[in-house]
Image: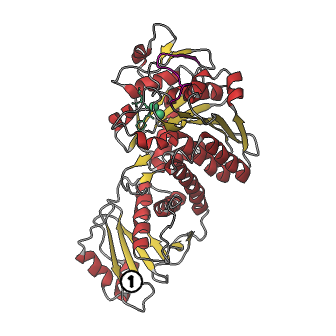
Amino acid sequence: MDIKTTETSLLEWRGDGLAIGFWEDEVALSGDLATLDQALQGILQAAIEDAEFKGAVASTVTTRVGVGGNFKKLILVGLGKNEKVKVDRYRRAAANIARSAKKEKCETLAVSLPTSSDISAALFTQAISEGLWLALHEDKRFKSKPEESKKNLQEVHLLSLAGNDPAVATAQSIVSGVNLARELVAAPANVVTPAALAATAQEIATAYGLELKVLERADCEALGMGAYLGVSQASALPPKFIHLTYKPTGTPRKKLAIVGKGVTFDSGGLNIKGAGSGIETMKMDMGGAAATLGAAKAIGQLKPDVEVHFISAAAENMISGTAIHPGDILTASNGKTIEVNNTDAEGRLTLADALVYAEKLGVDAIVDLATLTGACIIALGDDISGLWSTQQDLADSILAAAETAGEKFWQMPMEEKYFEGLKSPIADMKNTGPRGGGSITAALFLKQFVNEVPWAHLDVAGPVWADKDNGVNNAGATGHPVRTLVNWVIS
Ligand code: BES
Ligand code: MN
Ligand code: ZN
Protein backbone atom coordinates (compact mmCIF):
# COMPACT_ATOMS: atom_id res chain seq x y z
CA MET A 1 0.00 0.00 0.00
CA ASP A 2 1.23 3.45 -0.95
CA ILE A 3 0.82 6.54 1.19
CA LYS A 4 1.47 10.09 0.12
CA THR A 5 0.78 13.57 1.35
CA THR A 6 -0.98 15.95 -0.99
CA GLU A 7 -2.21 19.53 -1.05
CA THR A 8 -5.56 18.31 -2.39
CA SER A 9 -8.45 19.21 -0.09
CA LEU A 10 -11.36 17.01 0.88
CA LEU A 11 -13.63 18.97 -1.46
CA GLU A 12 -11.57 18.07 -4.52
CA TRP A 13 -10.43 14.54 -3.78
CA ARG A 14 -11.93 11.64 -5.75
CA GLY A 15 -11.64 7.95 -4.86
CA ASP A 16 -13.34 5.23 -2.86
CA GLY A 17 -13.28 6.38 0.74
CA LEU A 18 -12.87 9.64 2.61
CA ALA A 19 -11.90 9.49 6.29
CA ILE A 20 -12.38 12.57 8.44
CA GLY A 21 -11.18 13.02 12.00
CA PHE A 22 -12.95 15.06 14.70
CA TRP A 23 -11.94 16.28 18.14
CA GLU A 24 -14.36 15.23 20.83
CA ASP A 25 -17.28 17.65 21.24
CA GLU A 26 -16.16 19.53 18.12
CA VAL A 27 -18.33 17.83 15.54
CA ALA A 28 -20.24 20.95 14.46
CA LEU A 29 -19.67 21.32 10.72
CA SER A 30 -18.12 24.54 9.45
CA GLY A 31 -15.86 25.68 6.60
CA ASP A 32 -14.95 22.92 4.15
CA LEU A 33 -16.91 20.35 6.15
CA ALA A 34 -20.11 22.42 5.85
CA THR A 35 -19.48 22.74 2.11
CA LEU A 36 -18.89 19.00 1.86
CA ASP A 37 -22.07 18.27 3.80
CA GLN A 38 -24.00 20.47 1.37
CA ALA A 39 -22.51 18.69 -1.63
CA LEU A 40 -23.52 15.40 0.01
CA GLN A 41 -27.06 16.64 0.64
CA GLY A 42 -26.64 16.49 4.40
CA ILE A 43 -25.34 12.93 4.62
CA LEU A 44 -22.36 13.92 6.78
CA GLN A 45 -24.53 15.73 9.33
CA ALA A 46 -27.06 12.88 9.27
CA ALA A 47 -24.34 10.27 9.87
CA ILE A 48 -23.11 12.23 12.89
CA GLU A 49 -26.61 12.52 14.32
CA ASP A 50 -27.71 8.97 13.56
CA ALA A 51 -24.70 7.48 15.31
CA GLU A 52 -24.71 10.09 18.10
CA PHE A 53 -21.07 10.57 17.08
CA LYS A 54 -19.28 12.90 19.48
CA GLY A 55 -15.67 12.36 18.40
CA ALA A 56 -14.74 10.18 21.39
CA VAL A 57 -11.40 8.42 21.12
CA ALA A 58 -11.58 5.23 19.02
CA SER A 59 -15.20 5.82 17.92
CA THR A 60 -15.85 5.38 14.22
CA VAL A 61 -18.86 5.78 11.95
CA THR A 62 -19.00 4.56 8.37
CA THR A 63 -21.63 5.37 5.82
CA ARG A 64 -22.29 4.95 2.12
CA VAL A 65 -22.79 8.23 0.30
CA GLY A 66 -24.99 8.60 -2.79
CA VAL A 67 -23.92 7.14 -6.13
CA GLY A 68 -22.12 9.44 -8.55
CA GLY A 69 -20.27 11.68 -6.09
CA ASN A 70 -16.51 12.14 -5.65
CA PHE A 71 -16.29 9.09 -3.36
CA LYS A 72 -18.41 6.19 -2.06
CA LYS A 73 -17.70 5.74 1.61
CA LEU A 74 -17.40 8.22 4.41
CA ILE A 75 -15.44 7.21 7.52
CA LEU A 76 -15.68 9.41 10.61
CA VAL A 77 -13.19 8.86 13.39
CA GLY A 78 -12.99 10.36 16.86
CA LEU A 79 -9.69 11.70 18.22
CA GLY A 80 -10.79 12.51 21.78
CA LYS A 81 -10.52 15.92 23.41
CA ASN A 82 -8.27 18.51 21.81
CA GLU A 83 -6.11 18.94 24.89
CA LYS A 84 -2.76 17.45 25.96
CA VAL A 85 -2.56 15.77 22.58
CA LYS A 86 0.10 13.07 22.29
CA VAL A 87 1.12 11.96 18.84
CA ASP A 88 -0.09 8.42 19.46
CA ARG A 89 -3.70 9.66 19.16
CA TYR A 90 -3.07 10.11 15.46
CA ARG A 91 -1.42 6.72 15.11
CA ARG A 92 -4.42 5.03 16.72
CA ALA A 93 -6.98 7.03 14.78
CA ALA A 94 -5.21 6.12 11.55
CA ALA A 95 -5.21 2.45 12.56
CA ASN A 96 -8.98 2.64 13.09
CA ILE A 97 -9.39 4.30 9.72
CA ALA A 98 -7.33 1.60 8.02
CA ARG A 99 -9.47 -1.14 9.55
CA SER A 100 -12.71 0.57 8.54
CA ALA A 101 -11.44 1.22 5.02
CA LYS A 102 -10.49 -2.41 4.66
CA LYS A 103 -13.89 -3.56 5.89
CA GLU A 104 -15.52 -1.16 3.42
CA LYS A 105 -13.37 -2.58 0.61
CA CYS A 106 -11.89 0.80 -0.29
CA GLU A 107 -8.99 0.56 -2.73
CA THR A 108 -8.24 4.25 -2.58
CA LEU A 109 -8.63 6.34 0.53
CA ALA A 110 -8.14 9.93 1.60
CA VAL A 111 -7.46 10.90 5.20
CA SER A 112 -8.15 14.31 6.64
CA LEU A 113 -7.38 14.76 10.33
CA PRO A 114 -7.31 18.04 12.25
CA THR A 115 -3.78 19.09 13.22
CA SER A 116 -2.76 20.01 16.75
CA SER A 117 -0.46 22.82 17.85
CA ASP A 118 1.19 20.28 20.20
CA ILE A 119 2.43 18.09 17.34
CA SER A 120 4.89 18.94 14.56
CA ALA A 121 3.84 18.45 10.94
CA ALA A 122 6.46 15.74 10.40
CA LEU A 123 5.40 13.72 13.44
CA PHE A 124 1.74 14.13 12.49
CA THR A 125 2.36 12.64 9.06
CA GLN A 126 4.71 9.96 10.39
CA ALA A 127 2.30 8.76 13.07
CA ILE A 128 -0.67 8.60 10.70
CA SER A 129 1.37 6.66 8.17
CA GLU A 130 2.60 4.27 10.86
CA GLY A 131 -0.93 3.66 12.13
CA LEU A 132 -2.28 2.91 8.66
CA TRP A 133 0.49 0.46 7.80
CA LEU A 134 0.66 -1.17 11.22
CA ALA A 135 -3.05 -1.93 11.30
CA LEU A 136 -3.04 -3.50 7.84
CA HIS A 137 -0.23 -5.97 8.42
CA GLU A 138 -1.37 -9.54 7.87
CA ASP A 139 0.60 -12.71 8.35
CA LYS A 140 -0.60 -15.62 6.24
CA ARG A 141 2.77 -17.38 5.91
CA PHE A 142 1.58 -20.52 7.61
CA LYS A 143 -1.78 -20.95 5.84
CA SER A 144 -1.66 -23.44 3.00
CA LYS A 145 -4.51 -21.65 1.19
CA PRO A 146 -4.54 -18.04 2.31
CA GLU A 147 -7.86 -16.31 1.60
CA GLU A 148 -7.13 -13.58 -0.88
CA SER A 149 -9.48 -10.64 -1.10
CA LYS A 150 -9.69 -8.99 -4.50
CA LYS A 151 -10.13 -5.49 -3.17
CA ASN A 152 -7.25 -4.26 -1.04
CA LEU A 153 -6.37 -0.80 0.10
CA GLN A 154 -3.78 0.33 -2.43
CA GLU A 155 -3.40 4.03 -2.16
CA VAL A 156 -3.87 6.51 0.67
CA HIS A 157 -3.64 10.26 0.32
CA LEU A 158 -3.14 12.40 3.40
CA LEU A 159 -5.01 15.56 2.45
CA SER A 160 -4.31 19.27 2.81
CA LEU A 161 -0.61 18.87 3.52
CA ALA A 162 2.60 19.88 1.72
CA GLY A 163 3.05 17.28 -1.01
CA ASN A 164 5.39 14.25 -0.76
CA ASP A 165 6.43 14.66 2.86
CA PRO A 166 9.52 12.47 3.60
CA ALA A 167 7.99 11.65 7.02
CA VAL A 168 5.99 9.01 5.14
CA ALA A 169 9.21 7.21 4.16
CA THR A 170 10.45 7.40 7.76
CA ALA A 171 7.24 5.70 8.86
CA GLN A 172 7.67 3.06 6.19
CA SER A 173 11.17 2.19 7.39
CA ILE A 174 10.03 1.96 11.00
CA VAL A 175 6.98 -0.16 10.13
CA SER A 176 9.15 -2.53 8.09
CA GLY A 177 11.18 -3.08 11.26
CA VAL A 178 8.08 -3.56 13.41
CA ASN A 179 6.68 -6.06 10.94
CA LEU A 180 9.93 -8.00 10.83
CA ALA A 181 9.82 -8.27 14.63
CA ARG A 182 6.16 -9.33 14.50
CA GLU A 183 6.90 -12.04 11.96
CA LEU A 184 9.90 -13.36 13.88
CA VAL A 185 7.88 -13.57 17.10
CA ALA A 186 4.83 -15.09 15.42
CA ALA A 187 6.78 -17.80 13.64
CA PRO A 188 7.10 -21.00 15.67
CA ALA A 189 10.26 -22.36 17.27
CA ASN A 190 10.71 -24.96 14.54
CA VAL A 191 11.09 -22.10 12.05
CA VAL A 192 12.77 -19.35 14.04
CA THR A 193 15.83 -21.14 15.40
CA PRO A 194 19.08 -19.48 16.50
CA ALA A 195 20.42 -20.13 12.98
CA ALA A 196 17.31 -18.53 11.46
CA LEU A 197 17.86 -15.41 13.58
CA ALA A 198 21.46 -15.29 12.35
CA ALA A 199 20.24 -15.69 8.75
CA THR A 200 17.80 -12.82 9.25
CA ALA A 201 20.66 -10.69 10.58
CA GLN A 202 22.61 -11.59 7.44
CA GLU A 203 19.72 -10.47 5.22
CA ILE A 204 19.59 -7.12 7.00
CA ALA A 205 23.35 -6.73 6.75
CA THR A 206 23.29 -7.44 3.02
CA ALA A 207 20.26 -5.31 2.24
CA TYR A 208 21.31 -2.18 4.13
CA GLY A 209 25.10 -2.42 4.36
CA LEU A 210 25.58 -3.36 8.01
CA GLU A 211 28.45 -5.50 9.30
CA LEU A 212 27.64 -8.91 10.72
CA LYS A 213 29.68 -11.13 12.99
CA VAL A 214 28.21 -14.45 14.13
CA LEU A 215 30.12 -16.16 16.93
CA GLU A 216 29.81 -19.94 16.84
CA ARG A 217 29.91 -22.14 19.94
CA ALA A 218 33.72 -22.49 19.80
CA ASP A 219 34.13 -18.70 19.54
CA CYS A 220 31.89 -18.23 22.58
CA GLU A 221 33.82 -20.88 24.49
CA ALA A 222 37.05 -19.03 23.72
CA LEU A 223 35.47 -15.90 25.20
CA GLY A 224 34.44 -17.83 28.31
CA MET A 225 30.70 -17.36 27.80
CA GLY A 226 29.78 -20.16 30.18
CA ALA A 227 26.43 -18.72 31.25
CA TYR A 228 25.11 -18.37 27.70
CA LEU A 229 26.50 -21.72 26.57
CA GLY A 230 25.02 -23.45 29.61
CA VAL A 231 21.53 -22.47 28.45
CA SER A 232 22.19 -23.79 24.98
CA GLN A 233 23.86 -27.08 25.93
CA ALA A 234 20.79 -29.35 25.87
CA SER A 235 19.59 -28.16 22.48
CA ALA A 236 20.13 -30.05 19.25
CA LEU A 237 20.48 -26.62 17.63
CA PRO A 238 23.80 -24.80 17.85
CA PRO A 239 23.92 -21.40 19.56
CA LYS A 240 24.48 -18.32 17.42
CA PHE A 241 25.86 -15.17 19.01
CA ILE A 242 24.73 -12.41 16.68
CA HIS A 243 26.51 -9.06 16.45
CA LEU A 244 25.23 -6.72 13.76
CA THR A 245 26.78 -3.26 13.47
CA TYR A 246 25.44 -0.14 11.82
CA LYS A 247 28.08 2.55 11.21
CA PRO A 248 27.22 5.96 9.79
CA THR A 249 29.41 7.36 7.02
CA GLY A 250 30.80 10.26 9.07
CA THR A 251 31.96 10.29 12.69
CA PRO A 252 29.18 8.92 14.87
CA ARG A 253 27.49 11.35 17.28
CA LYS A 254 27.26 8.50 19.79
CA LYS A 255 27.75 4.75 20.01
CA LEU A 256 24.99 2.54 21.34
CA ALA A 257 24.37 -1.15 21.95
CA ILE A 258 21.00 -2.87 21.86
CA VAL A 259 20.99 -6.37 23.32
CA GLY A 260 17.95 -8.62 22.85
CA LYS A 261 17.11 -11.89 24.59
CA GLY A 262 16.97 -14.51 21.86
CA VAL A 263 15.68 -17.70 23.45
CA THR A 264 13.95 -19.26 20.46
CA PHE A 265 12.09 -21.68 22.70
CA ASP A 266 11.95 -21.75 26.48
CA SER A 267 10.92 -25.16 27.77
CA GLY A 268 12.17 -24.17 31.21
CA GLY A 269 14.92 -26.78 31.03
CA LEU A 270 14.86 -29.40 33.78
CA ASN A 271 12.76 -26.96 35.82
CA ILE A 272 10.31 -27.61 33.04
CA LYS A 273 7.38 -25.29 32.54
CA GLY A 274 4.35 -27.19 33.85
CA ALA A 275 0.67 -27.21 33.02
CA GLY A 276 -0.80 -23.71 32.78
CA SER A 277 2.64 -22.11 32.45
CA GLY A 278 2.02 -21.13 28.85
CA ILE A 279 4.86 -23.29 27.56
CA GLU A 280 3.12 -23.43 24.17
CA THR A 281 3.59 -19.66 23.84
CA MET A 282 7.33 -19.76 24.50
CA LYS A 283 8.22 -19.28 20.84
CA MET A 284 7.90 -15.61 21.76
CA ASP A 285 10.87 -15.78 24.12
CA MET A 286 13.03 -14.30 21.39
CA GLY A 287 10.90 -11.13 21.35
CA GLY A 288 13.90 -9.09 22.50
CA ALA A 289 16.07 -10.38 19.66
CA ALA A 290 13.20 -9.89 17.21
CA ALA A 291 12.81 -6.23 18.19
CA THR A 292 16.59 -5.79 18.08
CA LEU A 293 16.67 -7.05 14.48
CA GLY A 294 13.54 -5.02 13.67
CA ALA A 295 15.29 -1.90 14.95
CA ALA A 296 18.38 -2.81 12.90
CA LYS A 297 16.25 -3.08 9.78
CA ALA A 298 14.73 0.35 10.40
CA ILE A 299 18.05 1.98 11.35
CA GLY A 300 19.71 0.45 8.28
CA GLN A 301 17.22 2.40 6.17
CA LEU A 302 17.04 5.61 8.19
CA LYS A 303 20.84 5.90 8.37
CA PRO A 304 21.22 8.21 11.40
CA ASP A 305 24.63 9.59 12.45
CA VAL A 306 24.83 7.13 15.33
CA GLU A 307 26.79 3.86 15.55
CA VAL A 308 24.60 1.03 16.78
CA HIS A 309 25.54 -2.51 17.78
CA PHE A 310 22.68 -4.99 17.64
CA ILE A 311 23.42 -8.07 19.71
CA SER A 312 21.69 -11.31 20.60
CA ALA A 313 23.03 -14.42 22.26
CA ALA A 314 20.55 -16.73 20.55
CA ALA A 315 19.87 -20.17 22.01
CA GLU A 316 17.17 -22.68 22.78
CA ASN A 317 16.41 -23.69 26.39
CA MET A 318 15.79 -27.43 26.12
CA ILE A 319 16.07 -30.72 27.95
CA SER A 320 18.36 -33.66 27.14
CA GLY A 321 21.08 -35.74 28.71
CA THR A 322 23.41 -32.79 28.32
CA ALA A 323 21.12 -30.27 30.01
CA ILE A 324 22.36 -28.15 32.91
CA HIS A 325 21.28 -29.69 36.18
CA PRO A 326 19.52 -27.44 38.64
CA GLY A 327 22.33 -26.54 41.01
CA ASP A 328 25.07 -26.48 38.38
CA ILE A 329 27.57 -23.65 38.66
CA LEU A 330 28.37 -21.70 35.49
CA THR A 331 31.11 -19.14 34.96
CA ALA A 332 30.27 -16.10 32.86
CA SER A 333 32.72 -14.25 30.61
CA ASN A 334 33.49 -11.64 33.30
CA GLY A 335 34.60 -14.45 35.60
CA LYS A 336 31.56 -14.35 37.88
CA THR A 337 30.13 -17.69 39.00
CA ILE A 338 26.42 -18.46 39.00
CA GLU A 339 24.60 -21.23 40.82
CA VAL A 340 21.71 -22.14 38.54
CA ASN A 341 19.06 -22.84 41.16
CA ASN A 342 16.39 -22.68 38.46
CA THR A 343 17.02 -23.58 34.81
CA ASP A 344 13.90 -21.62 33.80
CA ALA A 345 15.62 -18.35 34.70
CA GLU A 346 17.68 -18.79 31.53
CA GLY A 347 17.23 -15.44 29.80
CA ARG A 348 19.39 -13.64 32.33
CA LEU A 349 22.15 -16.25 31.79
CA THR A 350 22.23 -15.57 28.04
CA LEU A 351 22.09 -11.81 28.63
CA ALA A 352 24.91 -11.90 31.18
CA ASP A 353 27.49 -12.83 28.55
CA ALA A 354 25.90 -10.59 25.93
CA LEU A 355 26.13 -7.58 28.28
CA VAL A 356 29.79 -8.29 29.08
CA TYR A 357 30.46 -8.46 25.33
CA ALA A 358 28.54 -5.23 24.65
CA GLU A 359 30.43 -3.26 27.28
CA LYS A 360 33.75 -4.25 25.70
CA LEU A 361 32.69 -2.46 22.49
CA GLY A 362 33.25 0.92 24.13
CA VAL A 363 29.70 2.19 23.63
CA ASP A 364 28.14 5.21 25.37
CA ALA A 365 25.04 3.30 26.51
CA ILE A 366 23.60 -0.20 26.50
CA VAL A 367 19.92 -1.08 26.40
CA ASP A 368 18.84 -4.68 26.79
CA LEU A 369 15.35 -5.93 26.12
CA ALA A 370 13.99 -9.27 27.15
CA THR A 371 10.88 -11.32 27.73
CA LEU A 372 12.55 -11.89 31.05
CA THR A 373 10.01 -12.52 33.79
CA GLY A 374 6.42 -13.53 34.38
CA ALA A 375 6.80 -11.37 37.48
CA CYS A 376 6.96 -8.25 35.31
CA ILE A 377 3.59 -9.20 33.79
CA ILE A 378 2.19 -9.68 37.30
CA ALA A 379 3.48 -6.21 38.23
CA LEU A 380 2.52 -4.23 35.11
CA GLY A 381 0.06 -6.34 33.12
CA ASP A 382 0.14 -7.21 29.44
CA ASP A 383 0.49 -3.74 27.97
CA ILE A 384 3.32 -2.12 29.93
CA SER A 385 7.00 -2.98 29.93
CA GLY A 386 9.27 -2.51 32.93
CA LEU A 387 12.27 -0.19 32.67
CA TRP A 388 15.28 -0.26 34.97
CA SER A 389 18.33 1.91 34.59
CA THR A 390 21.58 2.82 36.27
CA GLN A 391 21.32 6.33 34.86
CA GLN A 392 18.26 8.56 35.06
CA ASP A 393 19.12 10.54 31.89
CA LEU A 394 19.15 7.29 29.96
CA ALA A 395 15.86 6.20 31.51
CA ASP A 396 14.32 9.58 30.66
CA SER A 397 15.51 9.42 27.05
CA ILE A 398 13.91 5.99 26.64
CA LEU A 399 10.66 7.12 28.25
CA ALA A 400 10.54 10.12 25.91
CA ALA A 401 11.20 7.90 22.88
CA ALA A 402 8.47 5.53 24.05
CA GLU A 403 5.90 8.27 24.37
CA THR A 404 6.41 9.37 20.77
CA ALA A 405 6.34 5.71 19.76
CA GLY A 406 3.06 5.09 21.57
CA GLU A 407 4.59 2.19 23.52
CA LYS A 408 4.16 1.92 27.27
CA PHE A 409 6.92 1.65 29.86
CA TRP A 410 7.01 2.15 33.61
CA GLN A 411 10.23 2.78 35.48
CA MET A 412 10.88 0.21 38.20
CA PRO A 413 13.25 0.41 41.17
CA MET A 414 16.78 -0.95 41.06
CA GLU A 415 16.49 -1.91 44.74
CA GLU A 416 20.02 -3.03 45.67
CA LYS A 417 18.88 -4.55 48.94
CA TYR A 418 16.96 -7.22 47.05
CA PHE A 419 20.25 -8.59 45.74
CA GLU A 420 20.38 -10.42 49.06
CA GLY A 421 17.79 -12.77 47.58
CA LEU A 422 20.36 -13.81 44.96
CA LYS A 423 23.16 -14.63 47.41
CA SER A 424 24.54 -18.14 47.03
CA PRO A 425 26.44 -20.03 49.70
CA ILE A 426 28.64 -21.65 47.08
CA ALA A 427 28.95 -19.31 44.08
CA ASP A 428 28.99 -15.52 43.50
CA MET A 429 25.23 -15.51 43.04
CA LYS A 430 22.21 -17.65 42.27
CA ASN A 431 20.24 -16.99 39.10
CA THR A 432 16.86 -16.93 40.88
CA GLY A 433 15.65 -15.09 43.95
CA PRO A 434 12.39 -15.25 45.92
CA ARG A 435 9.02 -14.98 44.19
CA GLY A 436 8.30 -11.45 45.42
CA GLY A 437 9.90 -8.74 43.29
CA GLY A 438 10.98 -11.31 40.72
CA SER A 439 11.41 -8.77 37.92
CA ILE A 440 13.58 -6.60 40.18
CA THR A 441 15.95 -9.38 41.20
CA ALA A 442 16.22 -10.31 37.52
CA ALA A 443 17.34 -6.72 36.77
CA LEU A 444 19.79 -6.82 39.68
CA PHE A 445 21.22 -10.08 38.35
CA LEU A 446 21.87 -8.45 34.97
CA LYS A 447 23.48 -5.47 36.67
CA GLN A 448 26.28 -7.79 37.85
CA PHE A 449 27.43 -7.97 34.24
CA VAL A 450 27.68 -4.25 33.49
CA ASN A 451 30.43 -2.18 35.09
CA GLU A 452 30.67 1.44 33.98
CA VAL A 453 28.55 2.08 30.94
CA PRO A 454 25.10 3.62 31.47
CA TRP A 455 22.68 0.75 31.04
CA ALA A 456 18.95 0.22 30.87
CA HIS A 457 16.99 -2.99 31.01
CA LEU A 458 13.55 -3.39 29.44
CA ASP A 459 11.42 -6.34 30.55
CA VAL A 460 9.04 -6.69 27.61
CA ALA A 461 7.49 -10.04 28.62
CA GLY A 462 3.91 -8.72 28.44
CA PRO A 463 3.73 -6.34 25.46
CA VAL A 464 5.52 -8.43 22.82
CA TRP A 465 2.30 -10.40 22.47
CA ALA A 466 -1.34 -9.21 22.46
CA ASP A 467 -4.18 -11.63 23.10
CA LYS A 468 -6.62 -9.33 21.37
CA ASP A 469 -6.63 -6.31 19.09
CA ASN A 470 -5.12 -3.36 20.90
CA GLY A 471 -5.61 -0.46 18.54
CA VAL A 472 -2.51 -0.32 16.40
CA ASN A 473 -1.89 -4.08 16.59
CA ASN A 474 -4.03 -6.95 15.54
CA ALA A 475 -4.00 -9.85 18.01
CA GLY A 476 -0.67 -11.69 18.12
CA ALA A 477 2.91 -10.49 17.90
CA THR A 478 3.13 -6.72 18.32
CA GLY A 479 6.68 -5.80 17.34
CA HIS A 480 7.05 -3.99 20.68
CA PRO A 481 9.36 -2.08 21.34
CA VAL A 482 10.89 -1.50 17.88
CA ARG A 483 9.43 2.00 17.58
CA THR A 484 10.81 3.04 20.96
CA LEU A 485 14.27 1.68 20.14
CA VAL A 486 14.38 3.48 16.80
CA ASN A 487 13.20 6.77 18.31
CA TRP A 488 15.75 6.42 21.08
CA VAL A 489 18.60 5.82 18.62
CA ILE A 490 17.72 8.75 16.38
CA SER A 491 17.00 11.14 19.30
N1 BES B 1 10.64 -16.50 29.34
C1 BES B 1 10.27 -16.55 30.70
C2 BES B 1 9.48 -15.31 31.13
C3 BES B 1 8.12 -15.18 30.56
C4 BES B 1 7.03 -15.73 31.19
C5 BES B 1 7.91 -14.45 29.41
C6 BES B 1 5.77 -15.57 30.67
C7 BES B 1 6.65 -14.30 28.89
C8 BES B 1 5.57 -14.86 29.52
C9 BES B 1 11.51 -16.64 31.57
O1 BES B 1 12.59 -17.30 31.03
C10 BES B 1 11.11 -17.41 32.78
O2 BES B 1 10.81 -18.55 32.65
N2 BES B 1 11.11 -16.73 33.90
C11 BES B 1 10.73 -17.33 35.12
C12 BES B 1 11.75 -16.93 36.13
C13 BES B 1 11.67 -17.67 37.41
C14 BES B 1 12.07 -19.11 37.22
C15 BES B 1 12.57 -16.99 38.39
C16 BES B 1 9.37 -16.79 35.47
O3 BES B 1 9.09 -15.63 35.20
O4 BES B 1 8.56 -17.56 36.00
MN1 MN C 1 12.48 -19.42 31.39
ZN1 ZN D 1 12.68 -17.34 28.99
Is any atom of residue 341 visible in this view?
A: yes
Compared to residue 153, the image places residue 171 above or below, namely above
Task: Look at the image and say whether residue 242 sits in the magenta stretch.
Answer: no
Between 306 and 239, the residue placed more toward the observer is 239
The image position of residue 377, as x and y in percent, is: 36, 37
Quadrant position of the C terminus in the picture: top right
Instruction: Look at the image and say whether residue 321 sits in the magenta stretch.
Output: yes
Q: Is residue 299 left or right of residue 14?
A: right
**Front one among 401 and 477:** 477
- Residue 247 visible in the shown view: no
For disc 1, the marked residue is 36
Relative to the observer, which residue lies in front, 186 or 17? Answer: 186
Circle 1: residue type? Leu
- Mark 1: which secondary structure? helix
Q: Residue at x 76, y 46 (%)?
A: 249
Magenta stretch, residue numbers: 319-331
Q: How many marks?
A: 1
Viewer-closest of 109 and 249: 109
Residue appearing at x 51%, y 36% in the figure: 369
Picture layout, residue 168 above or below residue 378: below
Which SS does the magenta portion mostly show?
Answer: loop
Query: Along the horizontal axis of the image, is 72 left or right of 336?
Result: left
- Residue visible at 70% across and 33% down in the picture: 215
Figure quarter occupied by ligand 2: top left
Q: Residue furthest front?
A: 321
Expressed as whole percent of the image width and height from the top left, the position of residue 296 reads: 63, 46
Q: Is residue 370 above or below residue 293?
A: above
Q: Quadrant of the N terminus?
A: bottom right
Q: Position of residue 422 (x, y in %)?
A: 43, 16
